[in-house]
Image (tube, rainbow, N blue to C red):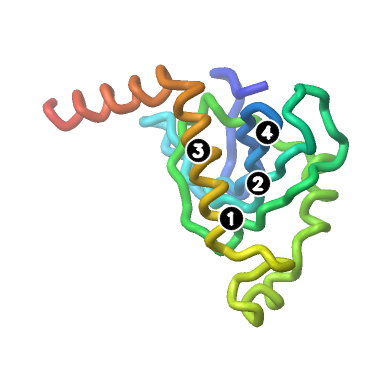
Amino acid sequence: MPLNGTERIDPAAIVRLSHAQSHLYAEVIQVMAERQMGWLRPLLLAEAEDESGAESPVPVKIHDLRQGADLLWPLDLLEPALDTEVLPLFSQLPPTDLLHLNGGETGGETAALSRRRLHQFMQQLWQANPVAFQLRQLEHNLAEKG
């Protein structure tokens, strides 16, 4: 369930963005309360086995995003991630020192593939939540004029 107006997100918290059977887990770097945006550092994208809507306890594919770029995202689309869901996923990621030795490859998956999947996931979220992004753009435009 996305955050409501009374919940707070603190820096260093792990949050989740969900769409269909995919979940992006990210660390909160900074909260920009006046803009209702969060600066996020993506950690991993977990994709479930099927798209039928049935919850799968173990995702088939985990994309390691720890070497990627940060994001700015509306706070109202974020969900707090529970330790019990995050820790099993993190245990499937390679150690970060191994990433540096392999040039960003994680078990045969290139960093480019992970970035591509993140980009696709973000596009799906934008399309599913157009109002959240249009309002942010309108607020930004008004602030620049004012």
User: Do labels 4 and 1 touch, CB within 8 Å?
Assistant: no
Residue 93's x, y, as percent? 76, 61
Dot 2 or dot 4: first in sequence order is 2
Vertical order, 88 against 145 (above or below): below
Q: Amino acid at mark 1?
A: Ser
Separation of disc 1 and disc 3 at Cα?
12 Å
Residue indicated by mark 1: 114
Residue indicated by mark 4: 80
Residue 105's x, y, as percent? 64, 70
- Binning the other alpha carbons within 10 Å of mark 2 as few (below 14), some (14 to 19) or many (20 upward) gives many
Residue indicated by mark 2: 45
- In this rendering, which labeled residue sits more in front, label 4 or label 3? 3
Left or right, residue 61 beside residue 13 = right
User: Do labels 4 and 3 touch, CB within 8 Å?
Assistant: no
Residue 70's mark?
none
SS label for mark 4: strand
User: Do labels 2 and 4 touch, CB within 8 Å?
Assistant: no
Residue indicated by mark 3: 122
Left or right, residue 36 beside residue 106 = left
Separation of disc 2 and disc 3 at Cα?
11 Å
